[in-house]
Image (tube, helix red, strand yellow):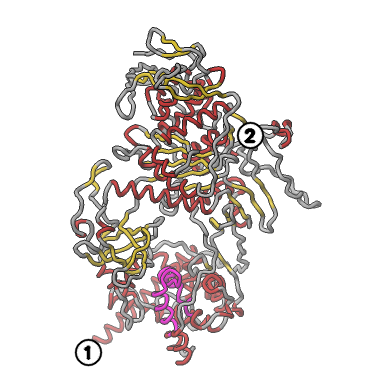
Amino acid sequence: MKAFKLLAILSASGFAALALGLVAFLVAYSVLSKQLPEIDTRTDFALEVPLRIYSADQKLIAEYGTQRRTPVAYNEVPEQLIQAFLSSEDDRFFEHPGVDWQGLVRAVGHLIATGTRGQGGSTITMQVARNFFLSPEKSYKRKLLEIFLALKIERELSKEEILSLYLNKIYLGKRAYGVAAAAQVYYGKTLDELSLSQAAMIAGLPKAPSRYNPIANPRRALQRRNYVLRRMHQLQHIDDNMLAAAQAEDISAELQSIEPDIDAGYVAEMVRAKLVKEYGTEVYNSGFHVYTTVHSDSQQAANRALRSGLQNYDRRHGWRGSEADVDIAAIVAKANSEEENQDIQITQADALQDYLSSKTTVGDLVPAIVTALGEQSATVEARSIGTVELDWDDLSWAKAYIDNNRVGEAPQTATDVLKVGDLIRLRARGKKTDPETQAERQDWTLAQIPKAQGALVSLNPENGALLALSGGYDFYHSKFNRAVQSRRQPGSSFKPFLYSAALEKGYTAATIINDAPVVFEDDKLETSWRPENYSGKFFGPTRLRWALTHSRNLVSIRILQDIGLNHTINYAGKFGLNTYNMPRDLSLSLGSSVVSPYELASAYTAFANGGFRIPAHFIEHINDANGQRVWQSNPPIICKDRCEELVGMAGAEEQPLVTDDSLVENTLAETADDEAVADGEIDTTTETEDNSAEEPAFVAPEPVLAERIMTPENAWLMHSMLRDVVSQGTARKALQLKRRDIAGKTGTTNDQKDAWFAGYTPKRVAVAWVGFDEVDTLGRAEVGGRAALPIWIEYMGEELKDVPQVLPDLPDGLVNVRINKTTGERASAGDPEAIFETFRSQYAPQEQYSNSNGNYGSSGNSGGEIVEELF
């Protein structure tokens, strides 16, 4: 009797709880149903014709238009593929009303019993509701909305319509949305051409498109495919023979989608930003083929050089430790708990590969986890590579980082550097012969993501075409483009503009300026200024050429004081440098203005091409989806003789000289500057639509003559002096290239916060910069010649391989004169200190004299006004 009463009480309690739950469910539905979106069954998915960006040699740089869709009708989907999806995702799809209550109960019971999620909680209809109609937030409210919306979908759409919607819109990895797109992306096939094995592979992707992706993680994809096949067998969709044959097939997926041929993410973003600014977001579906001026070999060389230089800097400053500590045992246990088929034991290697699949490769740095340590060796599991053995040569560099000026003691054992579970980076460094098998294998070394950043820009000085640009170690790690967005002090790499301005004022390469201590009380400076040379030494009377060669700061200051700020700033502006933010004080002589590497490279083209202003540009032409030309670049033409044969002078005057330097920076920085649009890179002219006539055919722009901003004599003398910087001065390391036509200038700012080298030949210009994004010292001795110049050398070593050496001809207005290298005056017969110097004929020294202040000059005016010693 008591048992009967207890059973009655329990039954009543159960009914009450059920009724209460039903009431709560109905109340929740009445409240939340008003928030449910309208069901949209549109099937007119727009086929995107993507925007594609190419290099000058027609290598793909980037493609925009992120979703690949190929809509198909329900009756066009093979029954076997439908069975594969239903078997893996929702085998009761045609039986439940949108919510599988049995599956939900199983999932809740599994969660309570094991603490882990089990299969059966989400139907295909719920996935449609979740993925296509609701926000991605995770909350109990959204879960209820998902359930209610699934019920609403089932009321308004047929099962076939729901499944068609799902199969057309579900994301299946690698930018493929829908089964038809996935079949094309992974196999290059239509749906009816898929094998059973391939259908099962695609059906296994919705659960985790990255984890089970046959391209990124083939081992896990194989396990998932076989699970789908076993489910199809259990549900009697396939027989024993079909199961065995399908499971025996290897992974046959190969990425069929278009992938970039070269790594030029920063260039791609420059082009994308410019096009969106000009055409709006519709450009993504325009089908435009944009051909840049970038050369694929040059770009790859720039990437390698910049990464190599930053890695070398980083190794000099020590090992900062692992990126994270990983619990290997926990990762393996989690992988096995999430495996639906408990008969399969996930290995440590597979579990770690699954974990590493979420860790991106940064440039050439592969993520890896330390699994074992020897006395002076380490075993690691590297993403998509597998097990890698590191020997002592790969580890011994890793002295502990202390600060930018100090490192710790050299490590003695592997445990001084690493521990098991460390998440680290590996970098390839050539091939190595295995001592046991004698087989050649890839050699890897311990590395880390550099804290310092850099940029490299390369231009053709004859037409301003961008040949290569790298705005950082890796675009996908940091999209901040230091080549155009970072404006830093150029240091001594600004001095050539000052020295050229001095030549314009009548200075010569032999003008003597006193390199001596000086104190300035400048109204524009807050305190007294006591500038020094980098060495801390002073060298007395110094020839202009020698001062530039060895980057003498005191000489530069005295030059600027003599020729004047206004003249110097206006003269620098002719090169395309932004003069608005240039300081109006004598610190300008030492490069205290700010420039981007792109801007500085564009300015240096005038030194390389003989004195012409050629603005940099990076788009060569644009074709529409039909291959018809819609825009063509029109760089100014350098003309030194008989220019009327190239272009009518009237036409040249009508079209203004334009530049895209400022537009690049403003577009990427998203600043509003209407003047920057008029840079000649994109034609903003619009025509009124006339439906009664066809649009006019593309008309090539009229040629434009380049503006000469330096006299031929000035340009030749500057090239000669900047060649001496390489042959005798601060850039002597570049002599390893074994070329006589290299010229350039190093640059270093106070406390070594920025390191530069701007160098060129008459056929190529390149600028390298190294520094921290958040301004900080690079460390003692990290000057331009050490931190930046090696990057330039490595790049130019590749870039100049097939470029012949060119030395500019001596202009008619220059003469060579023997002078005394100390006084700068014409040398007497038999003078043991005599050297040759080149002068403009009107400034060649005629006779030697000395004034009462001990400064040297000549009756031929070898340097404008005589520069007097100030202190």
Extreme front residue here? Answer: 830
| 112 magenta-colored | no
* Residue at image location 48% in from the left, 18% down from the top: 563
Give the residues drawn in magenta, as a range: 200-229
In the displayed structure image, the side of residue 55 where residue 372 appears, left or right? left
In the foreground, 548 or 809:
809
Mark before the other along the chain sequence, 1 or 2: 1
- Secondary structure of residue under mark 1: helix
Residue 208 is a magenta residue: yes
Q: Residue at x 49, y 28 (%)?
A: 497
Residue projecting furthest to the top:
852
> Could you say which disc has been placed on residue 719 in the image?
none
Q: Is residue 252 left or right of residue 684?
A: left
In x, y percent, where is residue 670?
51, 42
Q: Whole-percent x and y of residue 377?
A: 23, 63
Amino acid at circle 1: Ala
Disc 1 marks which residue? 3
Up the image or down, 178 lies above or below 789; here it is below
Q: Residue at x 42, y 82 (%)?
A: 226
Q: Residues within 10 Å of mark 1 (few under 14, many from 20)?
A: few
Q: For the C terminus, give its image quadrant.
A: top left
Q: Callout 2, which amino acid?
A: Ala
| SS of the residue under disc 2 | loop
826 w.r.t. 624: above or below: above
- List the residue tagged with mark 2: 706
